[in-house]
Amino acid sequence: MSTFPEQFSAATKANFEAQIAMLTALTNKTFESVEKIIDLNMNVAKASLEESTATAKQILAAKDPQEFFSLTAAQAQPSAEKAIAYGRHLANIASAAQAEFTKAAEEQIAETNRKVIALVEEVSKNAPAGSESAVAFVKSTIGNASAGFEQFSKTTKQAAETLEANMNTATSQFVQAAEKTASRAKK
Protein backbone atom coordinates (compact mmCIF):
# COMPACT_ATOMS: atom_id res chain seq x y z
CA MET A 1 0.00 0.00 0.00
CA SER A 2 1.43 3.35 -1.03
CA THR A 3 0.93 6.63 0.74
CA PHE A 4 -1.12 9.55 -0.53
CA PRO A 5 1.95 11.71 -1.27
CA GLU A 6 3.44 8.88 -3.36
CA GLN A 7 0.17 8.39 -5.23
CA PHE A 8 -0.20 12.13 -5.80
CA SER A 9 3.41 12.42 -6.97
CA ALA A 10 2.99 9.55 -9.44
CA ALA A 11 -0.27 11.01 -10.74
CA THR A 12 1.30 14.46 -11.10
CA LYS A 13 4.28 13.02 -12.97
CA ALA A 14 2.05 11.01 -15.32
CA ASN A 15 -0.13 14.09 -15.95
CA PHE A 16 2.92 16.24 -16.68
CA GLU A 17 4.28 13.65 -19.11
CA ALA A 18 0.91 13.45 -20.86
CA GLN A 19 0.79 17.24 -21.18
CA ILE A 20 4.29 17.31 -22.66
CA ALA A 21 3.26 14.60 -25.14
CA MET A 22 0.14 16.58 -26.07
CA LEU A 23 2.11 19.81 -26.53
CA THR A 24 4.62 17.98 -28.70
CA ALA A 25 1.83 16.52 -30.84
CA LEU A 26 0.13 19.92 -31.14
CA THR A 27 3.41 21.58 -32.07
CA ASN A 28 3.99 18.97 -34.77
CA LYS A 29 0.45 19.50 -36.11
CA THR A 30 1.03 23.26 -36.09
CA PHE A 31 4.22 22.89 -38.10
CA GLU A 32 2.46 20.55 -40.55
CA SER A 33 -0.30 23.13 -41.03
CA VAL A 34 2.20 25.95 -41.48
CA GLU A 35 4.08 23.84 -44.05
CA LYS A 36 0.82 23.27 -45.94
CA ILE A 37 0.06 26.99 -45.91
CA ILE A 38 3.57 27.87 -47.10
CA ASP A 39 3.32 25.25 -49.85
CA LEU A 40 -0.08 26.61 -50.88
CA ASN A 41 1.22 30.18 -50.94
CA MET A 42 4.31 29.22 -52.95
CA ASN A 43 2.20 27.37 -55.52
CA VAL A 44 -0.25 30.27 -55.76
CA ALA A 45 2.57 32.81 -56.12
CA LYS A 46 4.27 30.76 -58.83
CA ALA A 47 1.04 30.21 -60.77
CA SER A 48 0.08 33.86 -60.37
CA LEU A 49 3.43 35.03 -61.72
CA GLU A 50 3.15 32.71 -64.72
CA GLU A 51 -0.43 33.76 -65.43
CA SER A 52 0.33 37.46 -64.98
CA THR A 53 3.16 37.21 -67.45
CA ALA A 54 0.98 35.45 -70.02
CA THR A 55 -1.87 37.92 -69.47
CA ALA A 56 0.45 40.91 -69.77
CA LYS A 57 1.76 39.57 -73.09
CA GLN A 58 -1.80 39.11 -74.37
CA ILE A 59 -2.88 42.58 -73.26
CA LEU A 60 0.20 44.21 -74.78
CA ALA A 61 -0.54 42.44 -78.05
CA ALA A 62 -4.07 43.89 -78.19
CA LYS A 63 -4.69 45.61 -81.47
CA ASP A 64 -7.42 48.01 -80.37
CA PRO A 65 -9.06 49.31 -77.16
CA GLN A 66 -12.02 46.94 -77.50
CA GLU A 67 -9.72 43.91 -77.54
CA PHE A 68 -7.77 45.37 -74.62
CA PHE A 69 -10.91 45.77 -72.48
CA SER A 70 -12.22 42.40 -73.57
CA LEU A 71 -8.99 40.71 -72.45
CA THR A 72 -8.92 42.52 -69.10
CA ALA A 73 -12.60 41.73 -68.45
CA ALA A 74 -12.03 38.08 -69.28
CA GLN A 75 -9.53 37.89 -66.43
CA ALA A 76 -12.05 38.95 -63.74
CA GLN A 77 -13.92 35.67 -63.33
CA PRO A 78 -10.90 33.32 -63.37
CA SER A 79 -9.15 35.57 -60.86
CA ALA A 80 -12.19 35.55 -58.59
CA GLU A 81 -12.50 31.78 -58.89
CA LYS A 82 -8.84 31.34 -58.02
CA ALA A 83 -9.21 33.61 -54.99
CA ILE A 84 -12.20 31.58 -53.85
CA ALA A 85 -10.35 28.29 -54.36
CA TYR A 86 -7.41 29.68 -52.39
CA GLY A 87 -9.72 30.75 -49.57
CA ARG A 88 -11.38 27.35 -49.47
CA HIS A 89 -8.05 25.54 -49.43
CA LEU A 90 -6.80 27.79 -46.65
CA ALA A 91 -10.02 27.24 -44.69
CA ASN A 92 -9.66 23.47 -45.12
CA ILE A 93 -6.15 23.59 -43.71
CA ALA A 94 -7.31 25.67 -40.74
CA SER A 95 -10.34 23.45 -40.19
CA ALA A 96 -8.23 20.28 -40.23
CA ALA A 97 -5.77 21.83 -37.77
CA GLN A 98 -8.61 22.91 -35.48
CA ALA A 99 -10.09 19.41 -35.60
CA GLU A 100 -6.73 17.88 -34.69
CA PHE A 101 -6.29 20.32 -31.80
CA THR A 102 -9.79 19.63 -30.51
CA LYS A 103 -9.29 15.87 -30.75
CA ALA A 104 -5.96 16.03 -28.91
CA ALA A 105 -7.41 18.26 -26.20
CA GLU A 106 -10.43 16.00 -25.73
CA GLU A 107 -8.23 12.92 -25.48
CA GLN A 108 -5.91 14.63 -22.99
CA ILE A 109 -8.75 15.86 -20.82
CA ALA A 110 -10.47 12.47 -20.86
CA GLU A 111 -7.25 10.73 -19.89
CA THR A 112 -6.48 13.24 -17.15
CA ASN A 113 -10.04 12.96 -15.86
CA ARG A 114 -9.76 9.16 -15.79
CA LYS A 115 -6.49 9.35 -13.85
CA VAL A 116 -7.86 11.88 -11.35
CA ILE A 117 -10.94 9.74 -10.76
CA ALA A 118 -8.74 6.67 -10.25
CA LEU A 119 -6.59 8.62 -7.79
CA VAL A 120 -9.64 9.87 -5.88
CA GLU A 121 -11.04 6.33 -5.75
CA GLU A 122 -7.75 4.99 -4.44
CA VAL A 123 -7.42 7.74 -1.86
CA SER A 124 -11.04 7.33 -0.78
CA LYS A 125 -10.39 3.65 -0.03
CA ASN A 126 -7.70 4.68 2.42
CA ALA A 127 -9.46 7.80 3.72
CA PRO A 128 -10.10 8.02 7.43
CA ALA A 129 -13.59 7.58 8.79
CA GLY A 130 -15.71 10.73 8.58
CA SER A 131 -14.14 12.04 5.35
CA GLU A 132 -16.89 10.67 3.12
CA SER A 133 -18.41 14.11 2.54
CA ALA A 134 -15.05 15.55 1.43
CA VAL A 135 -14.52 12.65 -0.98
CA ALA A 136 -18.07 13.08 -2.33
CA PHE A 137 -17.40 16.81 -2.81
CA VAL A 138 -14.21 16.09 -4.78
CA LYS A 139 -16.04 13.54 -6.95
CA SER A 140 -18.86 16.02 -7.54
CA THR A 141 -16.40 18.74 -8.50
CA ILE A 142 -14.69 16.42 -10.98
CA GLY A 143 -18.06 15.48 -12.46
CA ASN A 144 -19.06 19.14 -12.82
CA ALA A 145 -15.74 20.00 -14.47
CA SER A 146 -16.20 17.13 -16.94
CA ALA A 147 -19.73 18.26 -17.77
CA GLY A 148 -18.49 21.82 -18.25
CA PHE A 149 -15.79 20.69 -20.64
CA GLU A 150 -18.25 18.58 -22.62
CA GLN A 151 -20.56 21.59 -23.00
CA PHE A 152 -17.62 23.80 -24.01
CA SER A 153 -16.53 21.19 -26.55
CA LYS A 154 -20.03 20.98 -28.05
CA THR A 155 -20.28 24.77 -28.25
CA THR A 156 -16.88 25.01 -29.94
CA LYS A 157 -17.86 22.39 -32.51
CA GLN A 158 -21.13 24.21 -33.22
CA ALA A 159 -19.27 27.49 -33.66
CA ALA A 160 -16.84 25.87 -36.10
CA GLU A 161 -19.71 24.35 -38.09
CA THR A 162 -21.51 27.71 -38.20
CA LEU A 163 -18.35 29.47 -39.33
CA GLU A 164 -17.84 26.92 -42.10
CA ALA A 165 -21.48 27.24 -43.23
CA ASN A 166 -21.21 31.05 -43.26
CA MET A 167 -17.99 30.87 -45.23
CA ASN A 168 -19.59 28.57 -47.80
CA THR A 169 -22.55 30.94 -48.13
CA ALA A 170 -20.29 33.96 -48.54
CA THR A 171 -18.18 32.11 -51.09
CA SER A 172 -21.27 31.15 -53.06
CA GLN A 173 -22.51 34.75 -53.06
CA PHE A 174 -19.09 35.98 -54.13
CA VAL A 175 -18.99 33.49 -57.02
CA GLN A 176 -22.42 34.62 -58.18
CA ALA A 177 -21.39 38.26 -58.02
CA ALA A 178 -18.15 37.54 -59.88
CA GLU A 179 -20.04 35.65 -62.60
CA LYS A 180 -22.49 38.55 -63.04
CA THR A 181 -19.64 41.05 -63.23
CA ALA A 182 -17.77 38.95 -65.76
CA SER A 183 -20.87 38.47 -67.93
CA ARG A 184 -21.58 42.23 -67.86
CA ALA A 185 -17.99 42.99 -68.79
CA LYS A 186 -18.22 40.70 -71.82
CA LYS A 187 -21.20 42.66 -73.16
Image (spheres, grey):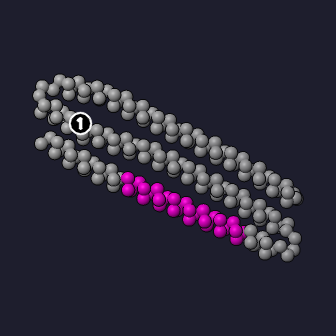
Which image quarter: residue 137? bottom right
Q: Position of residue 27 (x, y in %)?
A: 60, 41
Please identify the quadrant where the C terminus is shown: top left
Q: Residue visible at 27% across and 48% down? A: 175
Q: Quadrant of residue 11?
A: bottom right
* Residue placed most toward the observer, 35 or 119: 35
Residue in the picture at 33% in, 50% down = 171
User: Which image quadrant is residue 58 in?
Assistant: top left
Instruction: Give coordinates of residue 109: x percent, y percent.
Output: 64, 56
Residue 116 vertical position relative to residue 44 in the rendered view, above or below: below
What residue is disc 1 on?
75
Count residues near mark 1 (Cα–Cα under 10 Å), then give few for <14, some for 14-19, many for 20+: few
**What's the magenta bit mostly, secondary-structure-wise?**
helix
When the figure is inspected, residue 185 is found, relative to residue 46, above or below; the finding is below
Q: Is residue 49 left or right of residue 183?
A: right
What residue lies at 38% left-to-right and 33% top-to-bottom?
44
Q: Check the image and name the residue furthest to the front.
A: 65
Amino acid residing under circle 1: Gln
42 lies left or right of 147: left
Q: State the residue in front, 84 or 150.
A: 84
Q: Residue at x 52, y 62 (%)?
A: 154
Which stretch did the figure color magenta?
139-167
Q: Quadrant of the N terminus?
A: bottom right
Which is nearer the eye, 178 or 108? 178
Q: Would you place residue 17 above or below residue 42 in this image?
A: below
On whether residue 93 falls in the magenta region, the answer is: no
Magenta span includes 147: yes
